[in-house]
Image: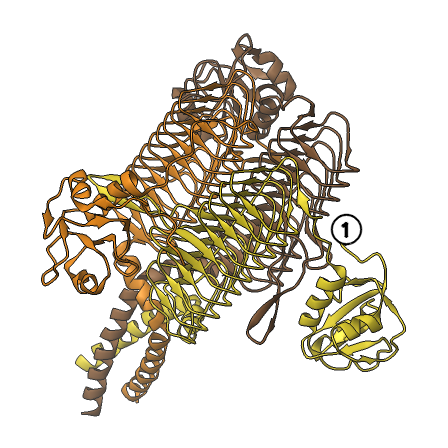
Chain colours: A brown, B yellow, C orange
Amino acid sequence: MMQSSTHTNPIPLEELAQSVQVSILGSSDILISGLSHLEGATCGDLSFVLKPRFHEVARISKAAAFLTTQPISDDPRPQLICANPILAMATLAKKYFQLPLPQHGIHSSAVTGHDVRIGPNVSIGPLVTIGDRAQIGSDVTIYAGVHIGEDTVIGDNCILYPHVSLLTHCIVGNRVILHSGAIIGSDGFGYAQHEGRHHKVPQLGNVCIEDDVEVGANVTVDRATFGSTIIKQGTKIDNQVQIAHNVVIGEHCIIVAQVGIAGSTRLGNHVMIGGQAGLVEHLIIGDQVRIASGAGVTNHVEAHHTVGGRPAVAHNTWRKAQVLQYQLPDMRNELRALRKEVDELKRKAGG
Amino acid sequence: MMQSSTHTNPIPLEELAQSVQVSILGSSDILISGLSHLEGATCGDLSFVLKPRFHEVARISKAAAFLTTQPISDDPRPQLICANPILAMATLAKKYFQLPLPQHGIHSSAVTGHDVRIGPNVSIGPLVTIGDRAQIGSDVTIYAGVHIGEDTVIGDNCILYPHVSLLTHCIVGNRVILHSGAIIGSDGFGYAQHEGRHHKVPQLGNVCIEDDVEVGANVTVDRATFGSTIIKQGTKIDNQVQIAHNVVIGEHCIIVAQVGIAGSTRLGNHVMIGGQAGLVEHLIIGDQVRIASGAGVTNHVEAHHTVGGRPAVAHNTWRKAQVLQYQLPDMRNELRALRKEVDELKRKAGG
Amino acid sequence: MMQSSTHTNPIPLEELAQSVQVSILGSSDILISGLSHLEGATCGDLSFVLKPRFHEVARISKAAAFLTTQPISDDPRPQLICANPILAMATLAKKYFQLPLPQHGIHSSAVTGHDVRIGPNVSIGPLVTIGDRAQIGSDVTIYAGVHIGEDTVIGDNCILYPHVSLLTHCIVGNRVILHSGAIIGSDGFGYAQHEGRHHKVPQLGNVCIEDDVEVGANVTVDRATFGSTIIKQGTKIDNQVQIAHNVVIGEHCIIVAQVGIAGSTRLGNHVMIGGQAGLVEHLIIGDQVRIASGAGVTNHVEAHHTVGGRPAVAHNTWRKAQVLQYQLPDMRNELRALRKEVDELKRKAGG
């Protein structure tokens, strides 16, 4: 197995350290050619150590140098001491090791409608389709096979990966990343029931995605019935999440894979939802709420609370019950024993 | 946040009322420029009120007029009294406010195979691919990037949104809507096990989708091993639902997002399945059955029953147990207290 | 409803029997025109019977002949006795009844980058995009609208169905099948938290898929942060499964639809995971482990164990508790009855 992306020209450790503004413990006179986890590191790699309990793993790692929160004793290799090694790694990865984006220009096979406005320094890949009157800001990268609907507006510095469907009349902010297969602006699931038939309610609204949002692969975000389905700034959404019509997701939320959020539910800011959780419709979820993976949320949750379980309840209540479910056979046996003994006591007492 | 789709030419309320055959309570002499929920309504909007308990919200709404089941007292604005305001809204939205479909014609960049038959008034967008011998009825709209496989047959008045994959040999009825990223006719998941290896069983069947079915974004419907996976008329399927090979879904069912239905399971008519529920293979689910969201169905369900839980049981049984799971710590404590007291009683009785 | 794929030229049963090396019980002098399940069989079909308890269904089936583990008594039709009728069916289906793959050649509308290497006997459909320096082996079939990223390497005899996204720098072995809408190599979900903001950690790794792997429709497999997300040989993955960054899946595993596997979790060989199960991050799952559908795995699982439930525990523990959850109301009532009786006994004893 090869590592897919390493820097071909080694970089002085000194330069990397300066770039994230940390000083080097030990010799600074080495070259770094890649980034890696401790286990997978090969010579030339810079790796990272989050906690003292990983120092032992670090000592046997083949990494050339470390980003670490605390000095690793008895190790002669250079160490960059910093409070947040992952943040430093992310910064270095972005600046030195990430693959460059495609070159600017519009591929000849792309199909653009009329009155489309495209900003400077944009890259539009092969077989992209862009509907009439769509607007695209500057420094946007649109990969092969993306579809952008009519009247949709995209800000600056966005990346749309292959096969994204960003449908009509949607609004996307700056620095937004949409991963492959994401569908933004599909119809909400709404019907008027009449005499045993389901009559489609046209979905006239749109989807608004604010700045710095990232949307995972094969995510679906439905357009609103009226108004907008909204994902606010800084929120990150993992793969295969389903967001129904008229949902509002606050700022800087984290929504892990395969979560489903039903219609008109509103999340506050900094909400975190674990994988495969489900939220029913018309809920209000407060700021800083944490929802455990697999939870089934059927009631409003107040700010700063942590909930879990199906139906979701306070975290402690859920955790205690979760453990005890597997003691049910013992409890049932104890109940039977008590019944026998109580009957015997009653017999004696009555006798 | 803007509303994406409003009618540019205001329409007399009188005309809207006549169109859904209801009479107006109050002045009819106003113009309507959009539809909206009560909360998001702006001046010029027609809104709707389903129950008397929303009358207070209606009174403070900025809507210009209401569709309502019962008259809202103390409100001077015009009211259209009707039994099913959502159905009336749906009718008006479709007739007056929905965006027009793309114009007829086949985009020059579409790639069609040989012996393809295409009916009148069809719109085929850019970069669509249509396999050999496919047949497409009249008044069908096929958006950008759709793929239609060889020998597949599509009826009249269907809409296929961008990036749908409708694979070979499938049959689609009239007025069917397939949303972006839906995959119709992928291989069923079938293997012959032999000496620790999984040998693929070729999936020779197809998918048949009857009239008036709607299939959500990123849904997957596998083709049958032999014969057909069938979705019967009027059934509506939400986003990210998985339907395995040889499943039969009855008429007028509602299947909410992220449901999974395993191989050869058969649903009756008017079945409703809540989000994230799962059904194992080879089940028979009767007419009018309702399955709660998150349920795990492992047994047949008779007609007209409602089930929930994992494993799914009768709705009442599930609801009672669901509440009591969180009393397990109290029950355990009570058991311990009883044990102590019974032991003490026995000691006394024996002494 | 029609069956989509039958052989047009009937084949002598004798030839089919020889092809799977079994002898015929009864007359061999008939022609077979299709394969089918017992229920759906029509005259001319060869069907299969797995167990004696299906002999009755076989007797009333319209099939012309049977593949069966044991002779069906009192039935004059020809029978092919074999230990593994499904394996025999699979072999015959593949050799005689499967639709042929598209003809070789590169469609004129496909867009290939520079320095792309394509082996012999390859079929590349319309509107396929292939990035710079990609390598494709021999006898590969790439259907319409597939995207292959830069520097990605594909082995021999692979099939990529319409709208697959196989992103940059990935490695795919021989005889791999990727179904429509599968996304291979999307970014892992990784952020450095800093002052209430989520800073993207660039995902520099790739995805490696070994020989004989099958990946279902709309599956997502994220690329590793560093190194590789790995799916080892012979593993089969159903639709809508989510595999996070740095996951390693062993050889010959079966992963049913809608399963989610979180970051860095490692599966051994021959693991089976039921539909809608979820595994949290950094787990180690041993060889031959079986995970029940809907399970939520939060701890390592040793080889050869079977687990179920949320949180997942040993199969027996889970099954007992699962049944007893619905006896909770009875248990609570019994607890109350005991409390009353014990109090009465105490009152008497104390009196």
Q: Which residue appears at 68% of the width and 59% of the height?
A: A225
Residue, far bottom: A351
- In what element is the residue under mark 1? loop
Give percent across and percent down for residue A77: 47, 14
* Residue C298 vertical placement versus A66 (above, below): below
Residue B36 at least partly seen: no
Give percent across and percent down for residue A23: 60, 17
Give percent across and percent down for residue A63: 45, 18
Residue A163 at least partly seen: yes
Taking depth in this image into account, of A150 and C317 the one nearest to the observer is A150
Q: Which residue appears at 31% of the width and 74% of the height?
A: B338
Residue, far right: B29
Quarter of the figure with residue B246: bottom left
* Residue C85 left/right relative to B211: left
* Residue B66 vertical placement versus B98 (above, below): below
Quarter holding the N terminus of chain C is bottom left
Q: Which residue appears at 34% of the width and 30% of the height?
A: C211
